[in-house]
Amino acid sequence: MKRFCIFLLLFVFSISVWVLPARATDSTEEIDKLKKETQGLIEEQNLLKKKIEDIEKKQAVAPTKPAEVEKKVVEAEKGGLQAGYDKGFYIKTPDENFLLKTNIFVQYRYTYLSFDRTVNTNDENWSNFFMRRARIFFSGNAPNKDWTYYFHIQLEPQSAVNLHDVYITWKKYPYAQVQFGRSKIPYGLHFWQSASLLNGVERSILSGETDVDGKSDTRKWPGGNANFPVSDEDSLTKYPIGGFNLFRSQGVQLQGDINVFGQDGFFQYWTGVYNGRNTKGSVNVDSSHLWAGRISINPFGKYNLLQQGDLDYSKTPKVCFLISGFSNTDRLTKYRSTADTDNDGYGDSKSATYDINGTGYNLAALLRYRGFSMDAEYGYDHLKQERLGGYTWDRFGYRVDAGYFLIPKRFEVVARHAYVERLKDNTKEKSLASGLGLVSVNGGTNNVIEDNLKEYTAGLNYYISGHNLKLSVDYSYLTRDFIPVPGATLTADGQHDNRFRTMMQFYF
């Protein structure tokens, strides 16, 4: 028994010597394996953590686009084109070398004009709903940003479809830009200011803006003699009977902004040669051209001269001083005498070949500061008939416009005074020979001479969405002074009329 117990002990000891080390080896391998798996998980975790950090860094560096209603970009599936809205509907390439922007513009107006019945033809008041402007604009650049284009299409119901403006501009050098095509002639300020950026229903009588349609409607104020449109001339003498502007023509011009005294655009200039005054898209009828130029001195840097009023609520003063001038010669074959055989108030037509030389200048200034705005402008024209017994005529006018925002960028009150002498130092002979004509008043015939025109206007503008959507109302007291025709038995000192207008503007 004793021997058996010793044998059993030796057997157990032998098994322990062989088995336990084997078991220990298996455990060590398992631990090593687990350690390796754990290390792999740690490395994978670190890798994921690094990826997250890289993504977060990229998000922090990349610019974020604000969610703006005004600018939404949709990438086209083909060609890499972009389309959206940013102050107009546009299509462009990613590098923006090719850009096409489209805008629509509508002004719908109501006018009530109360005549005082002094002038024979003003025998009934006038009430009218009126599509003053309906336009489409195409603008952009191609084949790169140095070349820009502009198309302005007129669609008013009373007019045929008309390409109002179309021009190309090379803008590589800001100080020397070249523009060619059909456009407004750079002269003066008020007519240059865009109709969509005015701080009122319409421009002043200095620009001849007196309803109804800007052309030859007989209901247009003041009535009774030559019509008073935006820009027009007598058909025979080419005497300007409209506003103090050169309107539009085809030509080429050089313009630029020059930085001086640390101010961007301290000095701006425009100079060009054109077919003629108010020639629009017509060809030139002779070898002479109209030359025009304008400079603007801007002590605090350049300002957008197209905009009237201080909708931007300028935190620093904006001041501009402008000087304009022009010279023009036309070859004519007709003139008017001082006789009026058919008693229509205009001189008889006569034949002769001669030149008429026209020159003029315009002085203007503007101020914008913290919702307050003021424009002042003066214009003078001189015309001379180069023929034996020819006439020399002069005319001048001025305006002062002021505005103030009672609530910034929302409610603005405006006031204006304008004065025009369509024929300076007017006489019966000048009225007949120029084409301005005499006026019939109080039942008489051709019994008074037009002396001057005056406008006093007050208004209110409600900017619903800036100039894009706004409502304007105004009241105008319009007067004309008369000079009696020598020997006339019936006469009048003047006429005094009242005008009420309201207009809604839509521009997108």
Image: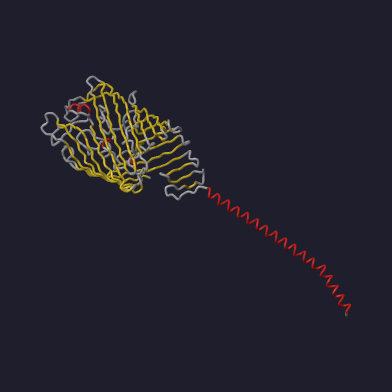
Which residue is located at x 16 percent, y 29 percent?
A: 343
Task: Give the residue displayed 73% in from the left and 63% down from the top.
Answer: 30
Image quarter of the N terminus: bottom right
Which residue reaches farthest front?
A: 261
Q: Is any part of residue 465 visible from this angle?
A: yes
- x and y, in percent, of residue 437 in the image: 20, 30
Q: Nearer the viewer, residue 255 or 263?
A: 263
157 or 466: nearer the viewer: 466
Left/right placement of residue 499 relative to residue 18 reads left
Q: Is residue 78 above or below residue 335?
A: below
In the depicted structure, whether residue 498 falls above or below residue 176: below
Coloration of the structure image: secondary structure
**Residue with the most extreme left position:** 489
Instruction: Find residue 48 and report its image quarter.
Output: bottom right
Considering every residue shown, the one lying at the far right of the view is: 3
| Along the line of sight, the residue nearer the viewer: 282 or 386 | 386
Left or right relative to 23: residue 236: left
| Residue found at the very far top of the displayed protein | 388
Residue 173 found in image quarter: top left
Picture coordinates of residue 196, whole percent (x, y): 34, 41
Image position, residue 356 (x, y; %): 28, 24
Could you tell me which residue is drawn at 29 percent across and 26 percent down? 358
Q: Where is residue 118 in the image (x, y as percent from the top left)?
A: 15, 38
Number of residue marks: 0
- Image quadrant holding the C terminus, namely top left
Image height of 373 relative to 353, above or below? below
Q: Can residue 280 be seen in this view?
A: no
